[in-house]
Image: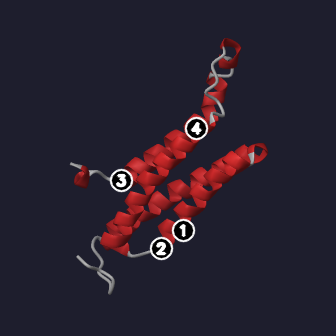
């Protein structure tokens, strides 16, 4: 069932949803603390979402690397984006400064992986075991 899923498209969609969530949610839910509800800046929720994004992205990029293009570029871009996402959780005062480059690098990594997979289709190198 999972073999036919396009994990790059899922990763791009998840990254875009995360960026929209982080940019628009404060506008819509700025009144929730008045009612005692705090979902903004919830460390556990944000950490869980980043881990979920990391899991989907890592699987997608590993699959593309191993089965298609053998390029480290998407992995490096993705790692930079995830590192910026985690940094954003630590350095709250620079949250917006770190958020947009983080989402940008993650999206670009998935787009690069997707395009490289389509361009190379099924490249073989010395390290192929399939």
Q: Real-space Cα distance between discs 3 and 2?
A: 17 Å
Mark closer to the chain start, 2 or 4:
4
Label 1 close to label 2 by CB (< 8 Å): yes
Instruction: Please say if 23 is above or below 67.
Output: above
Q: What's the coloring here?
A: secondary structure
Q: Which mark is residue 7?
A: 3
Mark closer to the chain start, 4 or 1:
4
Q: Real-space Cα distance between discs 1 and 3?
A: 17 Å
Q: Which mark is residue 72?
A: 2
On screen, residue 40 versus residue 117, left or right, reads: right
Residue 124 found in image quarter: bottom left
At label 1, counting other C-alpha atoms closer than 10 Å, the crowd grade (few under 14, some 14-19, many 20 or more) is some
Question: Which residue is located at x 23 percent, y 53 percent?
Answer: 4
Q: Real-space Cα distance between discs 3 and 4?
A: 25 Å
Instruction: Please say if 9 is above or below 71.
Output: above
Residue 91 pos. (x, y %): 75, 48
On screen, residue 45 versus residue 10, left or right, reads: right
Which of label 2 and label 4 is nearer to you?
A: 4
View extreme (front): residue: 44
Q: Which mark is residue 44?
A: 4
Which residue is disc 1 drawn over?
A: 76
Instruction: Please say if 86 is above or below 124.
Output: above
Question: Which residue is located at x 56 percent, y 36 percent?
Answer: 45
Instruction: Please say if 26 is above or below 49.
Output: above
- Element assignment for label 3: helix
Residue 34 found in image quarter: top right
At label 2, counting other C-alpha atoms closer than 10 Å, the crowd grade (few under 14, some 14-19, many 20 or more) is few
């Amino acid at each position: 069932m999972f073999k036919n899923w396009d994990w790059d498209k899922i990763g791009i969609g998840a990254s875009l949803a995360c960026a929209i969530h982080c940019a628009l949610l404060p506008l819509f839910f700025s009144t929730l603390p008045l009612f005692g509800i705090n979902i903004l800046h919830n460390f556990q929720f944000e950490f869980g979402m980043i881990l979920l994004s990391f899991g989907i992205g890592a699987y997608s990029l590993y699959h593309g690397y191993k089965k298609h293009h053998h390029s480290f570029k998407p992995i490096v871009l993705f790692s930079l984006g995830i590192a910026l996402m985690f940094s954003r959780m630590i350095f709250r005062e620079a949250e917006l400064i770190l958020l947009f480059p983080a989402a940008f690098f993650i999206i670009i990594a998935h787009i690069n992986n997707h395009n490289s997979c389509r361009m190379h289709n099924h490249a073989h190198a010395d390290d192929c075991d399939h």
